[in-house]
Image: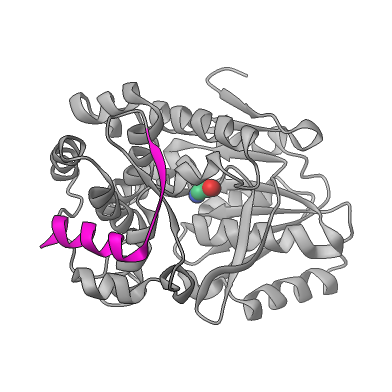
Amino acid sequence: MKNIKEVKVSLGERSYPVYIGKGLLSRVGKLFNLSRRVLVLTDRGVPKEYAEAVADACREPLTVTVKDGEGSKSLATYEEILTKMLRAGFTRGDCVVAVGGGVVGDLAGFVASSYMRGIDFYNIPTTLLSAVDASVGGKVAVNLSGIKNAVGAFYQPRGVLCDPSLLSTLPARQVSAGLAEALKMAVTLDASLFSLFENGDPIEDLEQVIAACVKIKASVVEKDEREGGLRRVLNFGHTIGHGIESRAGIEERENGLYHGECVALGMLPMSSSDVRARLLKIFNKFSLPTVSPVAPDSIFEALSHDKKAEGKFINAIFVNEIGTYEEKKIMPEELLTLAREVYL
Ligand code: GLY
């Protein structure tokens, strides 16, 4: 088909295409096998026309709309959805389609991974953050006892459809937060993508940014699907970022920070001073935060007990030069020192 970029994630019999192109949502019935019972999972924050367009292309759709926000990634919501599927007579030959951002994708994927021991799953990301990262690679999960993604699986989708025109209704701040995840990949793995951030305007060509990120993500996941090593590079900025998020995230307080904004801040202490200076210029350009709203000691306090365990090293990703990275084992206290140096 014309105007479609297709990136293949090659994982043997679990390989799948990621279709990228404006207007693709209208072709969903041609790209995915929806001639069966289909659970269309979305949330209240997603324009309802998107899930409706998918449902219209299905033979027997069951649309479930959960509350938006991390709270829906719970065992209770998971059980409610499974129960609805059972009552509607879903069998092993049926499938799940996620229409939403990271929360919907994670929840829908986990439902698909476990219903009747696993049924087909398709993902249609509607946030930039999910399009460039979370929708590809098969990490699916729900939270448990306040621990993010404590229960989950590696369960690859059968296909991902990414229609950049769905992102046009996103507020500018959410687009910037999504760009931070793309920037994370550029800083560590793709100097030419970084140069687009530094010298050009990635927002003008989101399709190109998404395609570049999906290619990077596919190549990382193909080499290390279950995060034994290489895939950890995608966690650049996340250790300190999660610490900030758990104190000042959008779920924690009014006017809190989005995940991508916390990741942006989390990259700063893990970068050389040259890289940090270049990142700060880019953050200013896209109105990403440049100063942590959380004091370094509080960030340290917020790290999981496991990360702080005495004598236990943390695998951390550092960047000295754009397009390269180094994984080092450091003590949690060293993270605190780095955060103090950068944020105070
Ligand atoms: N979001 C990081 C990963 O999929 O590994």
Q: Is residue 194 magenta?
A: no
Check the image and report above or below for 276 versus 144: above
Bounds of the magenta segment = 325-344
* Closer to us: 284 or 119: 284
Horizontal placement of 113 versus 252: left or right?
right
Hey, which quadrant is residue 241 in on the image? bottom left
User: Is residue 291 in view?
Assistant: no
The image quadrant that residue 251 belongs to is bottom left
**What residue appears at the point 63 percent right and 57 percent down from the top-left corner?**
140
x and y, in percent, of residue 59 in the image: 79, 49
Q: Is residue 170 visible?
A: yes
Please provide percent x and percent y for residue 66.
56, 71
Q: Is residue 48 left or right of residue 339?
A: right
Q: Position of residue 207 (x, y in %)?
A: 42, 29
Q: Is residue 335 highlighted in magenta?
A: yes
Which residue is at a point 40% across and 26% down the rendered structure image? 208
What is the quadrant of the C terminus in the image? Answer: bottom left
